[in-house]
Image (cartoon, rainbow, N blue to C red):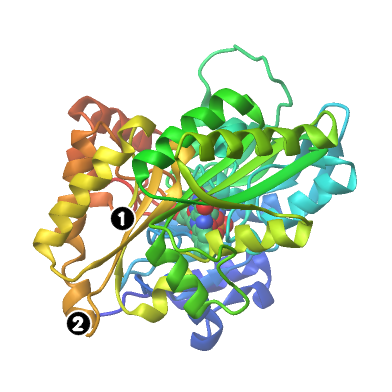
Amino acid sequence: MVQATLSSDLIARFAAITGPAHALTVEKDIAPYLVESRGLYHGTAPLVLRPGSVKEVSDILALATETRTAIVPQGGNTGHVGGSVPREGAADVVLSLSRLNRIRDVDPVGNVIVADGGCVLADIQAAAEKVGRLFPLSLGSEGSCQIGGNLSTNAGGTAVLAYGNMRQLCLGLEVVLPTGEIWNGLRRLKKDNTGYDLRDLFIGAEGTLGVITGAVLKLFPRPLGHEVAFAGLNSVEDALALFERASSRCGTALTGFELMPRLGVDFTTRHIPGVRDPLASRHDWYVLIDISTSDAADTAARMMEALLAEGIEAGLVENAVVAASDAQRKALWHMRESMSPAQKPEGGSIKHDVSVPVSAIPAFMAEADAAVMAAMPGARICSFGHMGDGNIHYNISQPVGADKQAFLDRWREINHLVHGIVLKYHGSISAEHGIGQLKRDELASVREPIEMDLMVRVKRSFDPAGIMNPGKVISV
Ligand code: FAD
């Protein structure tokens, strides 16, 4: 493919904004910015800019609009849909937010934290902890993903059940618009009904409308009681019945309810160092139950004990273990978070990030399993995920001994098959990872024409020059 480029004059004008040390043009320096975390997308770029201030971001975008230069905002580059990497063959400029990583204010009275868009999620969590508060967004990628990326993908993760996804965790935003104008919407208000909600347009926009440079995020009291259990079950139906009991018994104290198949547990114990099956017995399905309470420390323990006793008595839980220490709680979560990486050594894996109404999970999975096995005999289905909020990572590992590339070549065909069943159950083909490049061509088939039209109108009105992350989410 012919590689488009930028003139040396234009590169020099951009470099004058950040200073030459933060305008990367050498191939080996640029290389890490060009590959998406799962290796599915490899782009090209003549320039990576690393601005150190909001003003620099503003100057870069103003120049980009003037010169019709495409800009790809990049946070931790941990996204799964090819949204954070440049297009192949185009002259996109990557705008890395990594240097905008200052925590601006922590207010334990107002329960907010104000931070730059390039702050790493784990640093936000740590800053909250320092003042005795919790920032509840929790993802396997939290050591490298950034708040701006979390907002732009409306990230979900493991605590959505109790705290909601990123949209629910954000009060205000600061955004640099494609023209270079800065919108300061860093409001700290829970109640603010003054006109259109601009904030919610940028959340989940995947960098197609502007660059998020700052955010006001909600903090919560740190739980006093925290219990994590791992239970073996016979079926997804039993997992759903246990979830129903868990939500009635625990209410908002139920922080996580994660589903895992036997195959996933086998993969993690086989490939992830230090992971072991905490149960001596084997089961077809497993759930990780996380309960946290902010009143007395033993409330969570009593809830968990009663829930498991009820589950055993009802014949839903075959065996269970409750973590006895923080280290054991972390180990159980580590197993769950290793489900995806543990599939890699097993060869090719075709992924889906879907959601269906929680009560439809067993029927959806049974129908999808039957369709996939008919289309691909020998496929190894490893579907796991945030059962409590209906989000299943319906992943399929290649048959043992199959040709990896021939298997991966069927990615779109199998996505189409599974997504058709998702839609039948009134679900979503992108629960938490977004659209990016991966699902861009499918978007029009899952949204109404009027919705597509409104999205195009929003995009054109915010970004008339079409410089913001072109080729991602929607085609205009
Ligand atoms: P990037 O990948 O850099 O970018 C993502 C998108 O946001 C791109 O379109 C990019 O252009 C845009 N963007 C980035 N920063 C900005 C900004 N400042 N302004 C405007 N646009 C911007 N996701 C979940 O939701 N739940 C999970 O449980 C989860 N688990 C994961 C586990 C692992 C091991 C990995 C590798 C990923 C996981 N993810 C999960 C996916 C990913 O971590 C999230 O999508 C995360 O929110 C992306 O943040 P990032 O900073 O890496 O963004």
> Which disc, if any, is residue 94?
none
311 above or below 264? above
The residue closer to the viewer here, 266 or 385, is 266
Assess disc 1: are there few (<14), some (14-19) or many (≥20) residues with their C-alpha within 10 Å of its C-alpha.
some
- For badge 1, the amino acid type reads Gly
- Tag 2, which secondary structure? loop
Q: Residue at x 63, y 66 (%)?
A: 50
Considering every residue shown, the one lying at the far front of the view is: 313
Q: Residue at x 60, y 49 (%)?
A: 148
Check contact, mark 2 vs mark 1: CB within 8 A. no
Q: Is residue 285 left or right of residue 128?
A: left
Would residue 199 be visible to someone looking at this image?
no
- Residue 347 horizontal/vertical position (percent): 32, 79
- For badge 2, the amino acid type reads Ala
Residue that numbered label 1 is attached to: 471
The residue closer to the viewer here, 70 or 288, is 288
- Residue 166 horizontal/vertical position (percent): 57, 39
Which image quarter: residue 41?
A: bottom left
Give the distance between the C-alpha atoms of the residues marked 2 and 1, in whole angstroms: 33 Å
**Whether the residue under disc 1 has CB within 8 Å of ligand 1:** no
246 above or below 94? above
Q: Is residue 253 left or right of residue 83?
A: right
421 above or below 398? above
The quadrant of the picture occupied by the C terminus is top left
The quadrant of the picture occupied by the N terminus is bottom left
Q: Earlier in the sequence, mark 2 or mark 1?
A: 2
> Which disc, if any, is residue 402?
2
